Amino acid sequence: MTGEPEPMSAAARRALERELADLRGERQAVASTLRDSDTPGDAADQADELQRATQLERLDARVTELTVRLRQAADAGPPRTDAVGVGSTVTVRFEDGGVETVRIGEIAEDPEQTLVTADSPLGHALLGHRDGDRVSYEAPDGHASLTVLSIGDHRPGG
């Protein structure tokens, strides 16, 4: 990662927006259970109150994290199509002739099977490459190579 705002696919944006809405609903529910600090209670009540306050802090931190990430993605603009970057959809042909379309994303940004994280061996190897480039990398099973067929939300010939 470059430290600069990274683009995000539409699917990843929708997933984060759903998570953010869910978190805001959960936060509202937890906040409504907090009592006024002047209300007397026993030790168990105080422990429950402390646990809910801690949960509220955790929810607030995640809401802030998602809000910042969504804003950064908006500032970054759409994923690149001239070279592979975070947010790019890339169609590749492996040495065995298999063709696959993957999306280069961030860690756990969207639970989809075609997501390849930018810090994985494949994702890292693809970053910066262009259509037609031959890419070699160290896969868990050993050395591997592929060819970048296209970058963007399409398959070759489509």
Image: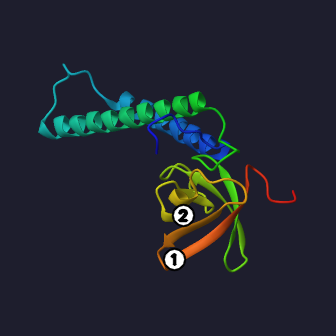
- Where residue 33 sits, quadrant-wise, is top left
At x 68%, y 56%, the residue is 90
x, y percentage for residue 133?
67, 60
Q: Is residue 53 left or right of residue 101?
A: left
Query: What is the CA distance from the residue labelled 1 to the residue labelled 2?
Result: 11 Å
Amino acid type, callout 1? His
At x 16%, y 30%, the residue is 41
x, y percentage for residue 102?
65, 59
The one of 42 and 73 positioned closer to us in this rendering: 73
Q: Which residue is mark 2?
A: 122
Q: Residue 14, labelled with which disc? A: none
x, y percentage for residue 92?
69, 64
- Report helix, strand or loop for mark 1: strand
Q: Residue 143, labelled with which disc? A: 1
Q: Is residue 127 above or below residue 16?
A: below
Q: Nearer the viewer, mark 1 or mark 2?
A: 1
- Where residue 30 sits, quadrant-wise, is top left
Point out the image quarter for the C terminus. bottom right
Q: Is residue 141 above or below residue 86?
A: below
Q: Earlier in the sequence, mark 1 or mark 2?
A: 2
